[in-house]
């Protein structure tokens, strides 16, 4: 059983660098190699959506020099990977409070999204300047302004049109979701690994998918009900 949508909280870049006597940014640069490896494996495994939590709204409180370098890394990565997106039929999407991003970075994002909009392979969603609470709050404001239409709240979330994650992976050993996809993860399976993000490559991703495949998702039902429904669908 392959999940349709995998979301990853990419944690541990700074610690990985510190363990090697390097500056934190060194870990972020090495982490981009894990992004590339995970995209490749997602395509190989048949995952349709891969969401990566790249930068939270809370991360703006980090030292200015680190934030500046992270934004530079994001812009550089987008420019460098655009040919790869096209070659591998990957659709590139950015979700978050983009009003806080620079005009130049927003132009790069818009260009990459426009160029890949028609691609039909893996949808790669980068969450940038995003927080789950911000998403719920901005959706509530827009929903109320439209007269609170019944049954359509999800259409106002920043992730409208994106399926809820089947599996959420967090690296580095931390066991929390840190304000990521609070609404969308109501029935998501969680997988926590002590592996730091720069070391999370294809083999580790495979382990997470294998663990997911061993689970039975119940959505509030009993195991017997799920088994019967599965048998009825055969």
Image (tube, grey):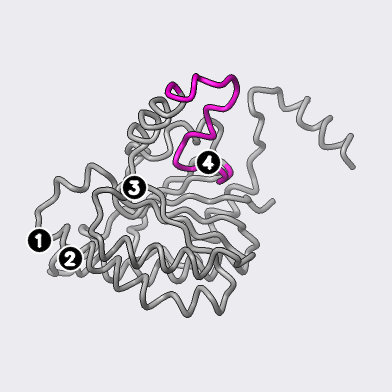
Q: Residue 182 carries which label?
A: none
Mark 2, secondary structure of its residue: helix
Label 3: few (<14), some (14–19) or many (≥20) C-alpha neighbours in 10 Å: few
Q: Does residue 146 belong to the magenta stretch?
A: yes
Mark 4, secondary structure of its residue: loop
Predominant SS of the magenta segment: loop
230 above or below 107?
Answer: above
Q: How far apart are the alpha carbons under marks 2 and 3?
A: 25 Å
Q: Mark 2 points at which residue?
A: 69
Q: Name the residue under label 4.
A: 160
Q: Mark 3 points at which residue?
A: 173
8 above or below 204?
Answer: above
Residue sitting at x 36%, y 57%: 195
Q: Name the residue under label 1.
A: 65
Span of residues in magenta: 144-163
In percent of width and height, residue 6 lies at 53, 51
Depth check, front residue: 196 or 137: 137
């Amino acid at each position: 059983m392959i999940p349709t949508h995998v979301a990853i909280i990419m944690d541990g870049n700074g610690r990985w660098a510190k363990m090697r006597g390097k500056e934190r940014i060194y870990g972020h640069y090495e982490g981009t190699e894990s992004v590339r490896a995970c995209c490749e494996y997602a395509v190989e495994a048949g995952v349709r959506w891969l969401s990566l939590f790249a930068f939270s709204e809370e991360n703006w409180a980090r030292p200015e020099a680190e934030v500046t370098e992270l934004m530079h890394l994001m812009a550089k990565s987008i420019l460098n990977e655009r040919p790869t997106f096209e070659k591998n039929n990957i659709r590139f999407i950015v979700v978050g409070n983009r009003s806080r991003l620079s005009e130049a970075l927003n132009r790069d994002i818009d260009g990459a999204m426009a160029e890949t909009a028609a691609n039909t392979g893996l949808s790669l969603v980068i969450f940038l300047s995003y927080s789950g609470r911000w998403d719920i709050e901005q959706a509530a404001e827009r929903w109320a302004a439209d007269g609170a239409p019944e049954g359509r709240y999800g259409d106002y979330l920043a992730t409208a049109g994106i399926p809820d994650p089947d599996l959420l992976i967090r690296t580095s050993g931390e066991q929390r979701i840190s304000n990521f996809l609070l609404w969308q993860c109501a029935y998501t399976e969680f997988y926590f690994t002590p592996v730091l993000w720069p070391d999370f490559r294809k083999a580790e991703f495979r382990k997470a998918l294998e663990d997911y495949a061993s689970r039975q998702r119940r959505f509030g039902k009993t195991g017997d009900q799920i088994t019967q429904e599965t048998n009825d669908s055969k």
